[in-house]
Structures are given as structure tokens and as C-alpha cells.
Amino acid sequence: MRTIDPFEILDGKAIKYLDVFGVEDGIALKSKYEDKSYWIYDYYCMHQTCDCQEVYLEFVEERKEINRRDSILE
């Protein structure tokens, strides 16, 4: 969870659900496609006078970190 600047909301910026409510078990969305894993982040308009009812989805490929020290030793 992060502190959201009121101007982000007033400017109509879409805010990530996890930024508002934080990380809880079972909330994060993850999916597989063509043997790759993706995190799915959902963004919502937070402006109080907006009635857009739109959701924006961002798909981010999950990457496994490589421990370079271990790979050098192998």
C-alpha cells in the first residue's frame, strides 16, 4: 500500500487496486499464458465525480531473479 497524492485522484489518474488496499492473500491476480506467468494489476478511476466505470488491466511478466554468484559457481 502506498500514500496516494490527492492530486492523482483529482487529475483523474487511474489508481492500482493494490496501492489503495494493500497486498492481501488471494487478492493479487496471476495467470499463465504460453508457459509464462503474468501478474495482472487492475486500475480504477478514483475521481468522485467520474462515472466512467472503466477498469484498466496491466499484464506484467513474472521474471525469476538469477543469483549471479550461484550461477558463476556452478
Image (spheres, rainbow, N blue to C red):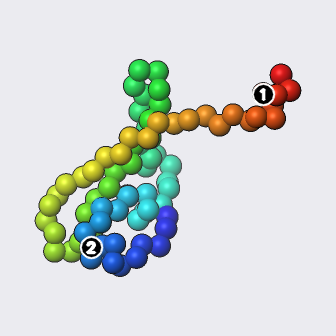
Near mark 2 (Cα within 10 A), the count class, few <14, some 14-19 or many ≥20, is few
Quadrant in which residue 38 is drawn = top left
Residue sitting nearer the eye, 74 or 3: 74
> Residue at left 33%, top 78%?
7
Residue sitting nearer the eye, 72 or 55: 72
Residue sitting nearer the eye, 33 or 67: 67
What residue is disc 1 on?
71
Q: Give how far apart the Cα atoms at labels 2 and 1 are.
A: 47 Å
Q: Amino acid at mark 1?
A: Ser
> Residue at left 29%, top 66%?
13
Near mark 1 (Cα within 10 A), the count class, few <14, some 14-19 or many ≥20, is few
Relative to 68, is 42 on the left or the right?
left
| Mark carried by residue 30 | none
Residue 68: where, in percent of width, then height?
76, 34
Give the SS element for disc 1.
helix
| Mark carried by residue 11 | 2
Q: Amino acid at mark 2?
A: Asp
User: Is the residue 28 above or below the residue 30 in the image?
Assistant: below
Give the SS element for disc 2.
loop
The number of callouts visible is: 2
Q: Quadrant of the C terminus?
A: top right
Of pointers 2 and 1, the one earlier in the residue sequence: 2
Relative to 12, is 40 on the left or the right?
right
Quadrant in which residue 9 is drawn = bottom left
> Residue at left 27%, top 73%?
11
Residue 32: where, in percent of width, then height?
42, 28
